[in-house]
Image (cartoon, coloured by chain):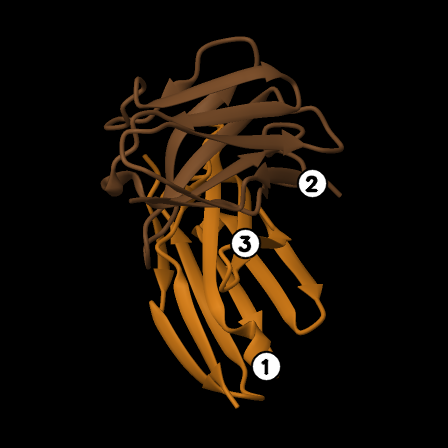
Chain colours: A brown, B orange
Amino acid sequence: GAVVSQHPSWVICKSGTSVKIECRSLDFQATTMFWYRQFPKQSLMLMATSNEGSKATYEQGVEKDKFLINHASLTLSTLTVTSAHPEDSSFYICSASQLGGALGGYTFGSGTRLTVV
Amino acid sequence: GIQVEQSPPDLILQEGANSTLRCNFSDSVNNLQWFHQNPWGQLINLFYIPSGTKQNGRLSATTVATERYSLLYISSSQTTDSGVYFCAVQTINDYKLSFGAGTTVTVRA
């Protein structure tokens, strides 16, 4: 089945630094990947849609200059949290699908727990 | 956008009990998935079920697309079934997967 790998699993960084999170589709090509954020005891909220070879599409209220997304290949998307602050501490999860979800649905990475101190 | 409502928000079960989780959605969908989020945050895909009925061991799911709801059945619950169950849907005109608020299931030994 489709496998999505996400790294790192957890990261602690100092306020003001940047953190990069990688999302890879291991056994399929994904022209579109998605980045979600989840706060404690809440549901997943879509942050942005990552499109291979073009600019990401951000959801309303998500700062594109703060959350940089790069989808340079059909198997890799990265999310960089720039100038991180404690309020950016959250659980970030990526997802991908072979055929836009129409066949078999979406697979999720294992998530990255970010703590900004 | 599409609205996804899950009920109940919380469910406490005794080990061995059966339960039903519900997901209502406000528009036609071409993708509906049920996920189990474990204590480490991993989202486990339980079912891809835009319509019909599927079974996998003690779990089964039914989606009635024309009436815009889906049900997840847990039979003979075990403590390992504890966690949050999410329903997520995708409409025909959108690539986005929209999540419900989830049902937190606690199974007690």
Query: Which numbered dot is residue A3?
Result: 2
At numbered mark 1, what does the secondary structure look like: helix, strand or loop?
A: loop
Q: Which element is circle 2 on?
A: loop
Same chain for mark 3 and mark 1? The answer is yes
At horizontal 59% and vertical 62% (from top left) the residue drawn is: B61
- Look at mark 1 in the image and give the residue it sits on: B78
> For numbered disc 3, what is the local secondary structure?
loop
Whole-angstrom CA distance, mark 3 to mark 1, is 19 Å
Q: Nearer the viewer, residue A3 or A104?
A: A3
- Residue furthest to the top in view is A54
The quadrant of the image that shows the C terminus of chain A is top left
**Does the CB distance between marks 3 and 1 fall below 8 Å?**
no
- Which callout, 3 or 1, points to the residue nearer the camera? 3
The amino acid type found where label 3 is placed reads: Gln
Q: Disc 3 or 1, which lies upstream in sequence?
A: 3
Residue underneath mark 3: B42
Q: Residues within 10 Å of mark 3 (few under 14, many from 20)?
A: some
